[in-house]
Image (tube, helix red, strand yellow):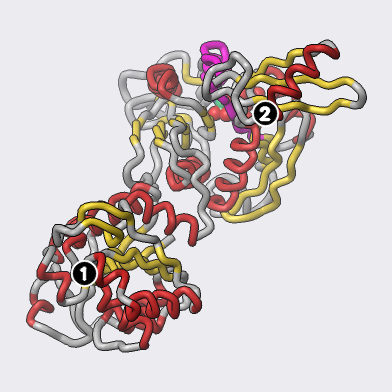
């Protein structure tokens, strides 16, 4: 998704660079527009270096047009349509007033009027300016028109005064943008290891055994996980795709290399998703020289290690493991058998016999299988499917739990304790207590922290 960051002229303009970085870390594509006043505080070059795009400043050709950092005569309507959200940080009293009154003398104000995307403003100014009825009235007008105001914090201001007017922290503003875009942040704090693409097993110096996997599903998962706040380690077979910015990419070629990379990094992961199409066999011997065509050729193959099964054997408590299954027949039956055989928490089951979906396609449909459920995820873009898969994974994301059957007495104690506001049970601070009804019997589930 695409976000336009508008920078207006306040001392907090330097923090807009941090905001750009924070948004990029959520795999958002970011461009920047600045007011003339903002350029007194920070150079466009900072933003063009961060975003890889020219910074939009003027509606008209200016001298800056010669300068690759600045830009001119850009179609603001096109830019307004490009953006899925506009966030102005810092938003000065002046820009708020212009927005409220529909003035459109520069690129940012024109874009504000032209966009239909969500607009957020993160005000920053002197406390008296913030409290002035004119500013508050403008803010109220903007709120009523649907603009989201990321409220400033209180504290020491650059002007030496103390009070409200300090721009909200960039991470906080980024969260508000994600929210406005309907993005949840439910994988924050998780490290997700994702395998993607196919492996290649050499036959001779120029030939290999491979498969049709493009890596699109794994890369889409990497992007989705990252945008939901996870740190992503992407272990990928050869692929023509660009990995999402900021994820750790480990490139491998063979199943053995993939195994080594996965085992090496899996300890860091809280969630492992094995979307790669790993070779099940490799040639028993690799010819030193290119094989000549001398008639029929028989190649002996030996099985590769099952990396997923090994990951399951080495898993540490709390680590979630999700596999993929590519099936061409008896899909559900084979998928269930694979789920149990591999011992994973879930399998994303693909029927790869269907035309136009799966391998090398931008579309995919799947069944999300656990030991107790089979959730149909109908055909959609791989990027969307990635989010749907993660929705289901997040729903599974429960730490190891301990189910304690309680006697009547204990039950009354627990119910009394959990109904009081004080945490009365001797559990770790992060632990939570749920009382689950089960007919006349009741059980308490104590989640480990
Ligand atoms: N997998 C793996 N190591 C292998 C083969 C597969 O880790 N050597 C993983 C894949 O990444 C996938 C899952 O196992 O997550 C299932 O892969 P799939 O090819 O569908 O099944 P296989 O295990 O290869 O079994 P089969 O070919 O018999 O269907």
Q: Which residue is mark 1?
A: 55
Distance between the alpha carbons at the discs numbered 2 and 1: 56 Å
Residue 322, placed above or below residue 92 = above
Front in this rendered view, residue 128 or 74: 128
Q: Which residues are magenta?
A: 306-326
Is label 2 within 8 A of ligand 1 (CB to nearest ligand atom)? no
Pointer 2: what residue? 420
User: Between tags 2 and 1, which lies in front?
Assistant: 2
Kind of element beneath mark 2 = loop
Residue in front for this viewpoint, 272 or 440: 440
Q: Is the residue under label 1 in contact with that under label 2 (CB below 8 Å)?
A: no
The residue located at (32%, 43%) in the rendering is: 246
Residue, x 63% and y 22% (percent of image)?
Answer: 344
Q: Residue 427: give its label.
A: none
Q: Is residue 361 visible?
A: no
Which residue does the image show at 41% across and 25% down from the upper left?
Answer: 254
Asked if one can make out residue 130 in the rendered structure from this viewpoint, the answer is: yes
Q: Secondary structure at mark 1?
A: loop
**Mark 1 sits near ligand 1, with its Cβ under 8 Å away:** no
Which quadrant of the frame does ligand 1 lie within?
top right
Q: Is residue 437 above or below residue 365?
A: above
Q: Quadrant of the C terminus?
A: top right
Lower position in the chain sequence, tag 2 or tag 1 = 1
Q: Is residue 218 part of the magenta span, yes or no? A: no
In the rendered image of this protein, does residue 346 appear above or below residue 91?
above
């Amino acid at each position: 998704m695409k976000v336009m960051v508008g920078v207006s002229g306040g001392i907090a303009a330097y923090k807009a660079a941090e905001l750009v970085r924070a948004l990029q870390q959520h795999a958002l594509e970011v461009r920047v527009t600045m007011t003339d006043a903002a350029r007194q505080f920070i150079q466009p070059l900072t933003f063009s270096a961060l975003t890889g795009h020219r910074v939009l400043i003027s509606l008209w050709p200016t001298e800056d047009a010669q300068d690759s950092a600045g830009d001119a005569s850009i179609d603001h309507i096109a830019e307004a349509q490009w953006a899925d959200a506009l966030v102005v940080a810092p938003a000065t009293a002046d820009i708020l007033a212009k927005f409220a009154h529909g003035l459109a003398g520069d690129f940012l104000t024109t874009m504000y009027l032209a966009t239909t995307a969500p607009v957020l403003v993160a005000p920053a100014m002197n406390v008296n300016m913030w409290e002035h009825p004119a500013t508050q009235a403008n803010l109220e007008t903007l709120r009523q028109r649907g603009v989201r105001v990321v409220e400033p914090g209180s504290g020491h201001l650059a002007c030496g005064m103390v009070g409200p007017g300090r721009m909200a922290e960039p991470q906080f503003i980024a969260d508000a943008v994600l929210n406005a875009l309907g993005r949840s942040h439910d994988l924050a704090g998780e490290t997700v290891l994702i395998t993607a693409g196919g492996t290649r097993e050499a036959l001779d110096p120029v030939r290999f055994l491979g498969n049709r996997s493009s890596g699109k599903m794994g890369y889409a998962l990497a992007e989705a996980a990252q945008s939901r706040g996870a740190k992503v380690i992407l272990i990928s077979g050869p692929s023509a795709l660009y990995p999402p910015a900021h994820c750790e990419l480990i490139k491998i070629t063979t199943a053995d290399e993939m195994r080594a990379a996965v085992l090496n990094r899996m300890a860091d992961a809280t969630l492992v998703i094995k979307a790669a199409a790993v070779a099940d066999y490799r040639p028993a011997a690799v010819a030193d020289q290119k094989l000549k065509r001398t008639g029929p050729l028989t190649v002996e193959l030996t099985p590769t290690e099952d990396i997923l099964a090994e990951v399951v054997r080495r898993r540490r408590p709390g680590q979630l493991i999700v596999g993929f299954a590519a099936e061409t027949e008896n899909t559900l039956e084979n998928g269930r058998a694979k789920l149990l055989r591999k011992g994973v928490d879930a399998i994303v089951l693909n029927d790869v016999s269907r035309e136009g979906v799966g391998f090398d396609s931008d579309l995919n449909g799947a069944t999300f299988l656990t030991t107790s459920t089979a959730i149909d995820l109908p055909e959609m873009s791989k990027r969307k499917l990635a989010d749907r898969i993660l929705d289901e994974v997040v729903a599974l994301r429960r730490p190891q739990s301990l189910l304690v059957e309680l006697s009547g007495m204990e039950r009354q104690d627990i119910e009394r304790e959990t109904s009081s506001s004080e945490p009365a049970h001797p559990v770790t601070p992060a632990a939570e207590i749920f009382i689950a009804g089960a007919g006349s019997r009741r059980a308490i589930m104590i989640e480990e922290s």
